[in-house]
């Protein structure tokens, strides 16, 4: 099942998707221990189903296991943020460069339309929150790279951990308008088929986003 297919097929899918959303959105706080017994009661499924869901959450970097402790939700840390965003900057920069070369004219039009819809949301708003999947600006560009190995690395391995940082410590205040402006510049470079500029702008955008989240993280833990 695609990490963006939100239609659960089995009870395991339903449990996995539900737990993933609870973790990303902070309903299950970072660092929380995951009890198979409690979760099986909450979701009305067997412990085996919960165990499978937890194993899947571990593969998408939202859960970690430690000896004599068990499964816990990953903590949001400065070191984790820096390392994650170093990888994200390199890979999404590459995705933007490839998107400029390989996105169809229709895909570029759709990306421009998506950004236009975001403008109405951002104007006069104190936050800039994007849902997962097709309505996510970054996800569209990753798909637009048309490089399956790159798409897999970004969507299967780190996408939801990135979303966890973005949702819980993401864009608000002055960063809203500047982030949107950066998105506009990236789309313009892709529209112009300027891959080198698109990569540069995407890497810079992710670096600025990392700096913004890092400041909030330090404030929250300071």
Image: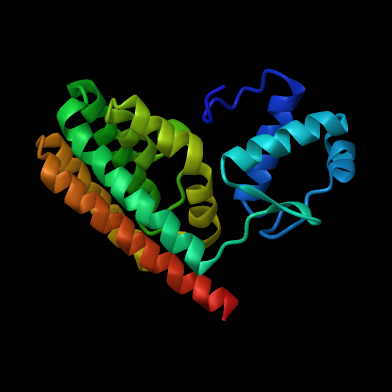
Colour basis: rainbow
Q: Is residue 171 visible?
A: no
Instruction: Give the x, y percent position of residue 178.
Output: 28, 61
Tell me the quarter of the picture where residue 195 sits.
top left
Question: Is 190 on the left-hand or right-hand side of 139?
Answer: left
- 18 over 30 or under it: above or below: above
Residue at horizontal 29 percent and vertical 40 percent from the top: 116
Question: Is 183 on the left-hand or right-hand side of 60?
Answer: left
Q: Nearer the viewer, residue 129 or 152?
A: 152
Question: Is 211 on the left-hand or right-hand side of 166?
Answer: left
- 176 over 140 or under it: above or below: below
Residue at horizontal 28 percent and vertical 29 percent from the top: 144
Q: Is residue 180 visible?
A: yes
Say which quadrant the N terminus sits in.
Answer: top right
Q: Nearer the viewer, residue 125 or 206?
A: 206
Q: Nearer the viewer, residue 173 or 215?
A: 215
Instruction: Give the x, y percent position of residue 5.
Output: 55, 25
């Amino acid at each position: 099942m695609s990490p963006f297919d939100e239609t659960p097929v089995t009870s395991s899918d339903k449990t996995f998707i539900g737990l993933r959303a609870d973790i990303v959105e902070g309903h299950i706080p970072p660092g929380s221990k995951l009890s198979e017994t409690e979760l099986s009661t909450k979701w009305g499924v067997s412990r085996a189903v919960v165990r499978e869901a937890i194993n899947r959450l571990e593969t998408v970097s939202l859960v970690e296991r430690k000896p004599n402790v068990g499964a816990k939700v990953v903590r949001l840390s400065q070191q984790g943020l820096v390392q994650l965003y170093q990888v994200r900057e390199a890979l999404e920069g590459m995705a933007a460069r490839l998107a400029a070369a390989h996105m169809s004219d229709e895909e570029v039009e759709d990306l421009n339309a998506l950004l236009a819809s975001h403008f109405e949301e951002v104007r006069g708003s104190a936050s800039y929150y994007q849902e997962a999947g097709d309505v996510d600006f970054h996800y569209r560009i990753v798909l637009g790279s048309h490089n399956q190995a790159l798409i897999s690395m970004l969507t299967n391995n780190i996408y939801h951990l990135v979303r966890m940082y973005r949702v819980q410590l993401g864009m608000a205040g002055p960063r809203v308008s500047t982030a949107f402006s950066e998105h506009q510049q990236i789309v313009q470079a892709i529209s112009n088929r300027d891959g080198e500029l698109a990569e540069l702008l995407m890497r810079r955008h992710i670096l600025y986003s990392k700096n913004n989240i890092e400041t909030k993280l330090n404030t929250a833990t300071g």
